[in-house]
Image: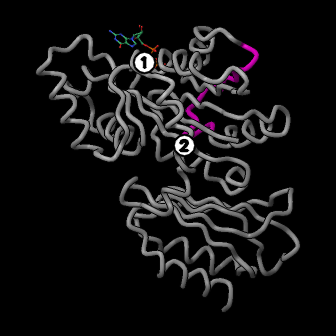
Amino acid sequence: MDIIIISGFLGSGKTTFLKKFRSLLDKNMKSVILMNEFGEVDIDSNIIGESQSIKSMTQGCICCSLKEDLEVQLHELYYNLNPDLIIIEATGVADPVEIIDAISAPAVMEFTQLKQLITVVDSQKLLTLNTTPQMKQLYLHQIKYANTLILNKLDVLTEDEINLARNAIKNINDQAYIIESIEHLSEKDIVKFYADHNLMNEIERHPSAHNIQSMTIKLSNSVEIESLHHWLGQLDDNIYRVKGFVTLRHIPDETYLLQYAFGIPQYEPYELKREPVIVIIGSQIDKERIKQQIEMLQFS
Ligand SMILES: Nc1nc2c(ncn2[C@@H]2O[C@H](COP(=O)(O)OP(=O)(O)OP(=O)(O)O)[C@@H](O)[C@H]2O)c(=O)[nH]1
């Protein structure tokens, strides 16, 4: 099941993009839109207006409070509808690092391929980034981690301002495929989106091109809970997330779901039996060192 994530500043044109994008998709393709609006009332799915293939997630942001819901929704969609494509429209306040984190849960990665992380950029806002440091950081992440950028709202800018916006974008991310304005989105772009490989694998293979790195390590042995806890506690700040399934030495018949975020580890029993695996997300990960540490966890 393919996944495309659409992120972007508040009001940048994500829903407008989605309408155009959907109109260009092959009519035989079964696609579902997963919309996440920050707030209790869902406005965007009413705009799109095809309620049958739209699922809304409100009352939170998929990158934080609704993260687990997203996993559950993806599972349900896969088993009940088995669509070809899921398009996730994130809230304007979602950080793509967190969304990638949410869909890189081992149980989700088994049946999904991340095809695109598309960010719709409000070019006018980009030129006058007059906001809090946190929001600035968020906007920068949305641009930096995308593999396709839509430079939108160019119609309200002068030619000089358009050039400034182009340069500003290139300075933040010079690897992304750029489309200037939603109206220029064409069937050729859709073909390109599909020709791209699974972005999760690309992130693992070419970290410098995507700024985030991930590594997946399959475990062949159980681990001591104390050693695991100690290992997680000493990880450097460049490791954003660790998650996976583990078996613990004192209860080897049960699978545990491991989650580690913002320095806090969590372990909880998982109903289904899963192959033990640990996924690590961060930047500039010393992979050899982490591999050795996980070997030690399993075999000492
Ligand atoms: N001038 C101009 N307006 C645009 C363009 N694209 C979208 N808009 C308008 O911008 C407004 C916001 O567009 P949406 O598509 O709802 O933006 P959004 O990112 O989904 O908004 P949120 O869900 O609130 O974050 C709407 O009034 C659109 O008609 C553009 O290229 N130029």
Q: Is residue 175 left or right of residue 77?
A: left
Q: Quadrant of the C terminus?
A: bottom right
* Residue 255: image tag: none
| Label 1 residue near ligand 1, CB within 8 Å | yes
Question: Position of 141 compared to 291: left or right?
Answer: left
User: How does the figure colour the protein chain or chains?
Assistant: one colour
At x 81%, y 58%, the residue is 270
Depicted 78 relative to depicted 130: above or below:
below
The amino acid on which the numbered mark 1 sits, given as a three-letter code, is: Gly
Give the side of residue 56 with respect to residue 181, left or right: right
Q: Alpha carbon of mark 1 to alpha carbon of mark 2: how far?
A: 24 Å
Residue occupying image coordinates x 70% and y 76%:
219
Q: What element carries label 1?
A: loop
Closest to the observer: 186 or 9?
186
Q: Where is residue 200 in the image (x, y as percent from the top left)?
A: 55, 53
Which quarter of the picture shows residue 4? top right
Quarter of the image where one finds residue 174: top left
Residue 58 shows up from this direction: no
Q: For label 1, count other residues whose C-alpha is less than 10 Å away and answer few (under 14), some (14-19) or many (20+).
A: many
Magenta-tinted stretch: 51-66
Q: In the picture, which quadrant includes the N terminus?
A: top right
Report the residue marked by disc 2. Answer: 195
Q: Which residue lies furthest to the front in this view?
A: 188
Q: Residue 58: say if magenta.
A: yes
Residue lying at the far right in this picture: please name it. 253
Q: What element carries label 2?
A: helix
Give neighbour class at mark 2: few <14, some 14-19, many 20+ (Cα, 10 Å).
few
* Res. 13 mark: 1
- Number of marks in the rendered image: 2
Q: In this view, does 266 lie above or below 246?
A: above
The first of marks 1 and 2 along the sequence is 1
